[in-house]
Image: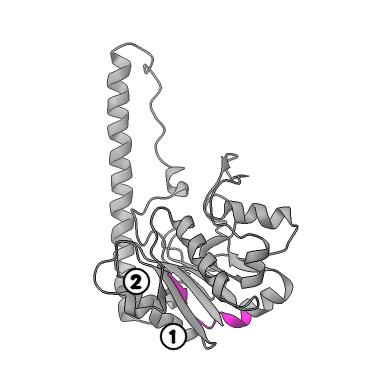
């Protein structure tokens, strides 16, 4: 049995899409366990189980996993799947091959300034292995990114647990041939699509890394420095707003294609 753990937040726009792609491409028995914080309408009946939870995304995933572990068999599988992610082909042959050689298969977003950790947009492991390694999607454990900075993100503590126990895992990386965006609208391992920022403002660490540098000349001069800081803050906020608006328009265009064409992903691969 596959236990799919997914989170949808404040929007129902991805629910029918995700469930349709699961039905289309997962041919082994599965159930879907979801968190639907602030999702409008009556959506609970579409899932096998809904678990209420609030606060951050990693905590919700950890709670879903804990509930699955409590009722599943050790050789069952947990498939973590972001609400705006879904398989585009049958993922299970690649999953079973990976789990024959490692304890976990997951997306690794190397394009996000060299991220090293398993990412929760798609991750599969055995229930017994998740329990054994005390799996944890929380951030905390750090690594050095491609800019030489120490960073952390969701899955950081999971990476730490795997390294601490010296356990191998199988990363799947971006396989897009066409990249409309350097981070989002991604196909990973030729098996799963992740839209990215499907439930929040489309802004990321990799985008912020390219934001204009703050002005420094004259910033220490009394009065003038305050004025420079105010203008600089407004300039950076305007840049951020333009980035969000542009990324949102692109995301909306692709979402429309997803709704109209089940083979939309062929534009990327």
Q: Nearer the viewer, residue 71 or 13?
A: 71
Circle 2: element type: loop
Q: Which residue is mark 1?
A: 23
Residues packed near mark 2 inside 10 Å, few (<14), some (14 to 19) or many (20 plus): many
> From where the camera sits, is residue 213 visible?
yes
Are the two marked residues, 2 and 1, in contact with CB atoms closer than 8 angstroms?
no
Q: Position of residue 8 (x, y in %)?
A: 37, 66
Q: Give the Cα distance between marks 2 and 1.
A: 14 Å
* Count of marks placed on residues: 2
Report the span colored magenta. Answer: 85-94
Q: Nearer the viewer, residue 28 or 256?
A: 28
> From where the camera sits, is residue 176 visible?
no
Residue 70's disc number: none
Quadrant of the drawing holding the N terminus: bottom right
Q: Position of residue 76 (x, y in %)?
A: 61, 78
Residues packed near mark 1 inside 10 Å, few (<14), some (14 to 19) or many (20 plus): few
User: Going by the picture, which residue comes out furthest to the front?
Assistant: 70
Q: Position of residue 265 (x, y in %)?
A: 43, 75
Residue 110 occupies which quadrant of the picture? bottom right
Q: Is residue 147 above or below residue 85?
A: above
Q: Nearer the viewer, residue 181 or 44?
A: 44
Q: Position of residue 208 (x, y in %)?
A: 43, 44
Q: Nearer the viewer, residue 9 or 149?
A: 9
Q: Residue at x 27, y 33 (%)?
A: 234
Tell me if residue 93 is in the magenta stretch: yes
User: Going by the picture, which residue comes out furthest to the right?
Assistant: 166
Circle 1: element type: helix
Tell me if residue 113 is in the magenta stretch: no
Q: Which residue is mark 2?
A: 14
In the image: residue 241, left or right of residue 5: left
């Amino acid at each position: 049995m596959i236990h799919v753990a997914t989170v949808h937040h404040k929007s129902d726009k991805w629910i029918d899409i995700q469930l349709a792609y699961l039905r289309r491409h997962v041919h082994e028995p599965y159930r879907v366990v979801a968190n639907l914080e602030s999702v409008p309408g009556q959506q609970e009946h579409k899932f096998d189980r809904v678990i209420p939870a609030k606060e951050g995304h990693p905590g919700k995933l950890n709670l879903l996993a804990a509930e699955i572990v409590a009722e599943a068999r050790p050789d069952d599988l947990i498939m973590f799947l972001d609400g705006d992610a879904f398989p585009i082909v049958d993922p299970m042959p690649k999953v079973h091959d990976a789990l024959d050689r490692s304890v976990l298969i997951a997306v690794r977003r190397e394009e996000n300034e060299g991220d090293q950790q398993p990412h929760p947009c798609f991750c599969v492991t055995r229930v017994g292995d998740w329990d054994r390694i005390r799996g944890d999607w929380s951030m905390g454990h750090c690594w050095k990114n491609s800019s030489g900075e120490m960073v952390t993100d969701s899955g950081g503590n999971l990476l730490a647990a795997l390294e601490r126990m010296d356990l191998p895992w199988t990363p799947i990386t971006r396989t897009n041939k066409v990249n409309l965006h350097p981070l989002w609208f991604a196909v990973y391992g030729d098996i799963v699509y992740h839209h990215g920022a499907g439930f929040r403002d489309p802004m990321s660490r990799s985008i912020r890394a390219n934001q204009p540098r703050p002005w420094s000349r004259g910033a220490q001069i009394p009065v003038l420095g305050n004025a420079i800081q105010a203008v600089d803050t407004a300039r950076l906020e305007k840049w951020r707003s333009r980035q969000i608006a542009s990324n949102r328009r692109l995301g909306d265009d692709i979402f429309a294609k997803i709704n109209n064409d089940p083979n939309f992903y062929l534009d990327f691969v």
